[in-house]
Amino acid sequence: MKATSGMVVSMHYTLTDDSGEVIDSSEGRGPFDYLHGHANIIPGLERALEGADVGFKSRVTVSAEDAYGVRNERAVFDVPRDQFPPNEDIQVGMQVHGEGPQGVLTFTVVDVGDDSVRLDGNHPLAGKTLHFDVEILGVREASEEEVAHGHVHGPAGHHH
């Protein structure tokens, strides 16, 4: 079987940046499963795996445009400090959530001043070229429920 739309692909991966620093890996956690053709993974990686079969091993480089997008500097902005609870210990690097028109948004704190907090709404990997070392371990047909829900379900009883 090949990785095509509606198939569940099981893989090991290691994600690194341009400097070779490991950002994420399935090592020690077991394989990562996703539903191919349903935008469960970044577009550039999904395209690279299209038609791959069990045993496929490759290093895939994905541009920012085909991963988490380019950085949008307009998504970096200051919020008055009094918008946060007075006793909250706000630190650079922590993530905070806010409501937007499309639901909950996540922001990363990039600076904390006396009167304001600078937030960044970009994905932490926006603007970065990503390098994946991947190995396809399994490919199976998705269940009707998985296709209907648009994602893989885990072992019995671990649906949502």
Image: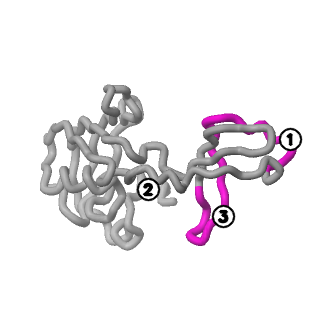
Label 3 to label 1, Cα distance in Å?
A: 21 Å
Question: Which residue does the numbered mark 3 point to in the structure image?
Answer: 99
Magenta stretch in the rendered image: 84-105
Please state the horizontal and vertical placement of residue 58, each as a whole percent of the image.
16, 38
Disc on the earlier residue, 3 or 1: 1
Q: Amino acid at mark 2?
A: Ala
Drawn side of residue 155 relative to residue 63, left or right = right
Nearer mark to the viewer, of 3 and 2:
3
Query: Residue at horizontal 34%, vertical 62%?
Result: 39
Q: Which element type, helix, strand or loop, lies under badge 2?
A: loop
Disc on the earlier residue, 3 or 2: 3
Q: Amino acid at mark 3?
A: Glu
Question: Which residue does the numbered mark 2 point to in the structure image?
Answer: 156
Q: Amino acid at mark 1?
A: Asn
Pointer 2: residues within 10 angstroms few (<14), some, or many (20+)?
A: few
Question: Which residue does the numbered mark 1 point to in the structure image?
Answer: 87
